[in-house]
Amino acid sequence: MNNLNSWLFWPEQVALSVLALFFILTIFLYAARQPAHNVITSLCNLGAHALRFASRWLLATAEGLRQRNKTVLLAHGQAEVTSQIEREFERVNNMVSKELSEYPAMQRKMMDELTRIEEDYQKSGEVPPPTPEWIEALSTIANLQSGGDIARKMLDELHRSVQKIHDKTINEYRKAYERRHKILKGLMPVWRSVDKTVKILDTNLINLTSNAKSIDVNMARYEEMRSKTDKSEHTLAISAFVQLGISSLVMLIAVGGAFINFKLIALPMSEMVGASDYITNNLRTSDVAALVIVLMEASMGVFLLESLRITHLFPTIGSMNDQLRKRVMWAALILLFILACIESSLALMRDMLVADKAAMLHDLATIAPVASDSLLTRIPMVGQMVMGFVLPFVLAFVAIPLEVVVYSLRTAGGVLMVTIMRAISFVLRFSAMIIHRLGHILINIYDITIVLPLLTERWIASLRDTSVRRNTDLKSGRTS
Amino acid sequence: MKNFKNMLLLCLLLPLLFAGCGDNRSHSNGVYLLIDTSGTYAQQITKARTIINYLLANLNAGDSLAVAKVESKSFSEKDIIAKVTFDRRPSQANLEKRAFNQKVDVFSKNIKGSAFTDITGGLIQAAEYLNEANPGNKTIIIFSDLQEELGKGTVRDFPIKLTGIRVMAVNVTKLSTDNVDPRRYLDRLAWWEKRVRDAGASDWLVINDLEHLDKLLNNQ
């Protein structure tokens, strides 16, 4: 209240004092109108320009980042497609060198078999039975003029001979048929062999066609990437996001496995490094040691898969000569095996410690411990040991999703960064527009506070205009 | 290749590095239990066994535990029934807990009631032990009715020092006179709280319900 009074000219007459103050302030604001307008405009322009500049810079940087991302993405995609095409060519090469190198031999075999089939077919052709010569003889006898006993005897004799010949002919005919059937039967495996050979050829050709199609698809993708189209960039980015999602899920599962692994060895590690040692306020040394063991297992797994050239996280290992690489592989495998054995024994120790603690608690509770040596008590122990041995090897495979995460995270991070930068740029641009408009609003508000002098000014100006017009009219009247 | 070798070596040496560093004292618990053996209170030994069992079950490797009796003159090492600082290895600590339990068992079977109750002397002895063991959290548990009765010539009316020690009174039974005038009981508790807090104790707590023993080892 005292502060307010200090502003009043006549504290007893507040209304008059406020009116006087308002009058003085209005006069001052009216006098400072133009410079005040200039200051408001300049400040708002300064703010708006600065924000617009920052927005433009962000947009340009985002574009640069997008280009860099695109380059990296396309290069990575090209490398991936190249390796896929190489693999397809390798398969085709293997097929051609393995299967089609045998093609001349196969063809020769097929030709032989076909020739044999043809020959056998010829052999199996039906041979007509020999023309019965006795028909002619019979007709000659029948044409004899004089009959009698001679003729009858001759006919009987002839009948016997004919019967004999007939039987012989039938026999031969049957034997011939039998031979032909045998030949045809002998053809069956040859047919089967030919059929098999043709099927193999068919399968090989289908595989070859499929590989050729795959190569065509990959080549088309490669061409797209080479021409740096937005479509290929978009496809690769989406693929990276999908891979990141899948790999993250697998990594999450692996982290769960690592946690179980950690829990399995944390307690027995306290037996080795002491349960009362702390590194920080809540971090036990035994917990850290267990964690280090788990991480070492994962690291050994990474080195193992790296030396097997399944992953490509360390170019140093990938570029080693084969002998050295194999040594690294064996070293990683042996260390992993040792760690698995250690973990298995720690799991056993954990079971013993838990059992010991349970027995002690029974002692304290003055209840005799239940002696149990059944299979049921051994199952968890064996289970823990097996888990302790297997989990390190399972963890070793975490290198594969890890590699995918590492590579796809760069792309996903880049895309996210560009999006964020663009969003910030938009916000800055919008703020610049708001500040620019705010200048106009402030100028109008300023003018509202000095509305009375402004109205007076306009009134005087209009009066002046009227008098000037009147004078002009008078002068023009005189002249006329 | 050299970097790769260095990394492998570091991975192998990390557990040793971690095993070598750290503080093994600042996080451990030290508990000193004073058991009143005067008069009829000696019959409460079964409840005292419950507390000891709870402590043995919940103290970890590296922690310290001592159990002493409160007699006519308790400022003496002879009154300590059993004391131990558990080994850093859990398996060894379990063996020590068993041995400790046996000592307490022997004591509880041969307990003899004393004529006087020198709680202050026991407190001074407890503070001395805990300061010597220097665990991270120091706790004195007084298992008594808190009715101090000093023999002739026993001087305890001087300020004591319990800096940074939590003091807890457990199973503070009501005497027959307390039932007549409950203010006597409340005054007794208030007097001990003032005495303990004046001595620099970090906390004062009374637990009469043995179902709430979890407060005993509530780390600061």
Image (tube, rainbow, N blue to C red):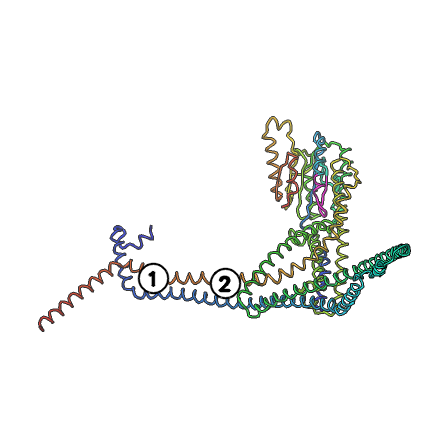
Residue A340 in the image: state x and y as whole percent.
75, 55
Q: Are marks 2 and 1 on the same chain?
A: yes
Which one is in front, A459 or A314?
A314
Q: Is residue A464 above or below residue B130?
A: below
The residue positioned 75% from the left and 65% from the top of the image is A328
First in sequence, mark 2 or 1: give its number. 2
Which one is in front, A256 or A83?
A83
**Residue span colored magenta:** B54-67
Q: Which residue is tagged 1? A: A440
Q: What element carries label 2?
A: helix
The residue positioned 79% from the left and 40% from the top of the image is A374
Q: In this view, does A235 lie above or below A270?
A: below
Res. B112 in view:
yes
Chain identity of mark 1: A
Q: Identify the amino acid type marked 2.
A: Met
Which one is in front, A42 or B213?
A42
Membership of A280 in magenta stretch: no
Q: In this view, does A316 lie to the left or right of A173?
A: left
Q: How many labels does the image show?
A: 2
Quadrant location of residue B107?
Answer: top right
Quadrant location of residue A225?
Answer: bottom right
Quadrant location of residue B194?
Answer: top right
Q: In which quarter of the image is the C terminus of chain A?
A: bottom left
Q: What element carries label 1?
A: helix
Which one is in front, A218 or A51?
A218
Q: Which residue is tagged 2? A: A421
Q: Is residue A371 above or below residue A422?
A: above
Q: Identify the amino acid type marked 1.
A: His
The circle on residue B126 is: none
Residue B176 in the image: state x and y as whole percent.
64, 27
